[in-house]
Every structure is written in structure tokens, then in C-alpha cells.
Amino acid sequence: MRKLRYSVATSLDGFIAGPRGEYDWIAPDPAFDFAAMFREFDTMLIGRRTYEVMQTRGQSAESMGMKAIVASTTLDAKANSGVTIIRENTVEAVAALKAKAGKDIWLGGGAMLFRALVDANLVDTVELAVMPIVLGSGVKVIPEGRRIPLRLEKTESFPNGMLWLKYSVITPDLAH
Amino acid sequence: MRKLRYSVATSLDGFIAGPRGEYDWIAPDPAFDFAAMFREFDTMLIGRRTYEVMQTRGQSAESMGMKAIVASTTLDAKANSGVTIIRENTVEAVAALKAKAGKDIWLGGGAMLFRALVDANLVDTVELAVMPIVLGSGVKVIPEGRRIPLRLEKTESFPNGMLWLKYSVITPDLAH
């Protein structure tokens, strides 16, 4: 089955955005091979706020070679005809999406979405680009909830101090 | 001047302890050379709660070759005659301590103590042993406050998934 991978930038103190949504402190290292990363995915799954931030930045899943799926109860379907919208039963919809053939699915933002999906044992990896800053306050990259054991898979340091961490989520073995 | 180094274990989601002080999830890797680390310090600076946790675990700064200094307004001096207690003016007391000759000072716990000292530009490094777990809730390793720019100095991965990160705090250059 293809993987659902939560891959986002974070401050060292675990914020995905500042208290007013600031992301000025996120400076991906030019040495990071985004193109190679994008090729591992064919679908981007995001929350509405992440989607709107991407729009204000002129970013789109299409330009990264992916199909966009936005989890939102409020997003206007007519004004956003280029994206698929999950309105309800998000967990079931994502489980069905994972069961389809395809490349991996990038959970690119929406920390609450991550928490709901990891609690449903649907998230396979947590991949963090840790920026060398204590942000002080903001939106938590990992919202509070239950414990989740992880396996460290990979780390990579970049010249600007960005640190790339990849963890696998250790999910309960339902077969036992 | 000798350095003040905040060096503690944390979960990936930035908790130094669980909501009831739990530390069962902290499993330092046997491959980590604690003895070598301890030799870099001659003083351990901690908050009262950290001190009390160490006592319940049978740990002491002395056994690590360090002198213990506890920041506390309430700790009983008679019952704890082996440690130096900072009762007030913590920032000034730590600044004076740093100005004395000696090895580095280990800020080994007390997240609020860390925040007060880093805000006073007295903390030189943040060194985190990141355990491969999302704890879900607890005591924040880096309490909320102002932004603090960092410089990534070193990372090291251990067999059990523990990740060692060392950052320097970029302090304002007071000479300019």
C-alpha cells in the first residue's frame, strides 16, 4: 500500500507557523532536492488553511506534479474547481485513498488533520525539516494527543542549518 | 568565558516530561558516552523539580563529578546541605557564576529556568537528546516566549533512535 507521509517544516520548538500564521522564518536550504522529493508523490493532502497559504504564495500541487486534495467543511467547490475536497468522514476517505494504486501521498500541512489521521493509524512517516530557530509561539506541528512511538529512519543536515528528520510511525500490529 | 549549556532529553513533540512528570519514555542510548559529557562540566544548574526527580532516581551531581546549584525559592537549605541554592536574582547569580573560572555549566533541567536565562542572553547552547516518540502532552522543553535564532552545530544518531542535536544560541552582538 502506498504511504501517507506527514512532511512539513517546523521550528526547533515544534511550531509549523507563527501565532498569526507567519512563515517568514522558513528558509528551505537551496541544497535540498525538492524536485526529487516531489517525484515520490502523486497526491498532496492538506487542510484548508495550508491550501490558502499556498494560494497566497502562488504555489500549487499541480506545479509540483501532484493532485491536490483539501480536507475542509467550508471551502467553496466552485471557486476551487481544481482541487478535490473531502468534506466529511476524512478518516474513511483517506483510508480509501491509500488503498488505491499510486505514488505516496504527501500530507503537507494541517496539523489537526495529521493528528486525526495518525490516531487512526493512517500516517506512515513523520518527516520534519527543522529550521534552526526557537519560534516562541504559534501553531503546533504535532498537536497534543496520545503517545506515538516512532522509528528514526534518516537524518540529514544542510548548510543553512536546516535539519531533515525522517521517522516511521510504529503502528499497532492489528494481525496479532 | 565558560558556557552555559541547556542539555536535556526531549520527545519529538518537545516535551521534557509527561503531564504527571513521567520520564519512562526516556531511554538514553547505551552507546552515548555520558562520562565524556560529564567531564566537560564542573557545575550542574537545575530547577527544584528536576532536583527532586534526580533524588528519587538516586542521581546526584556529585556522582557525575559536578557541584549542584538549585534555583528554588522553597527548597529547605538544612535538608539539602549538599547543594547551593539560588533563592533570588537568578539571572544575576548565573551571570556571576559564568564569569568565574571553570568548566562549562550544565543547565540540566528546569525549562522555565532555561527560558529566563536564554531571554537574558546567558545560554550558549541548546543540546537535545531527541527520543523517537511523540509524547502527546507534558512539560515543554522550550517554554513559549520570544524568538531565538540558532546555529546548528552537530547532530548524531544512535542505534536506539535517539538523536543528539547541538545548537548554538545566536545572541545579539552587544558591541554594535
Image (cartoon, coloured by chain):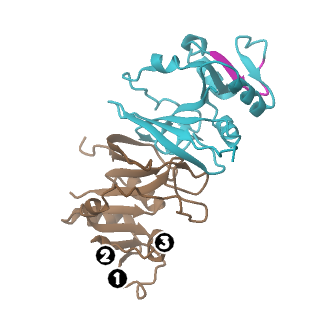
Chain colours: A cyan, B brown
Q: Give amino acid for label 2.
A: Glu
* In the image, residue B46 above or below residue B144: below
Question: Circle 1 sits on which residue?
Answer: B82
Q: Residues within 10 Å of mark 1 (few under 14, many from 20)?
A: some
Label 2 vs label 3: CA separation?
Answer: 15 Å
Callout 1 secondary element: loop
Residue placed furthest toward the front: A176
Classify the position of the C terminus of chain B by image quarter.
Answer: top left
Q: Quadrant of residue A100?
A: top right
* In the image, residue A59 above or below residue B78: above
Q: Give amino acid for label 1.
A: Gly
Question: Magenta span covers which residues?
Answer: A67-76
Label 1 vs label 2: CA separation?
Answer: 9 Å
Let me know if residue B93 appears in the view: no
In the rendered image, residue B114, in percent from the top left (x then y), is placed at 42, 58
Question: Circle 3 sits on which residue?
Answer: B53
Classify the position of the N terminus of chain B by image quarter.
Answer: bottom left
In the rendered image, residue A64, in percent from the top left (x then y), is placed at 55, 14
In the rendered image, residue A167, in percent from the top left (x then y), is placed at 51, 39
Callout 2 secondary element: helix
Residue placed furthest toward the right: A88
* Residues at marks 1 and 2 on the same chain: yes
Disc marking residue B62: 2
In the rendered image, residue B63, in percent from the top left (x then y), is placed at 31, 74
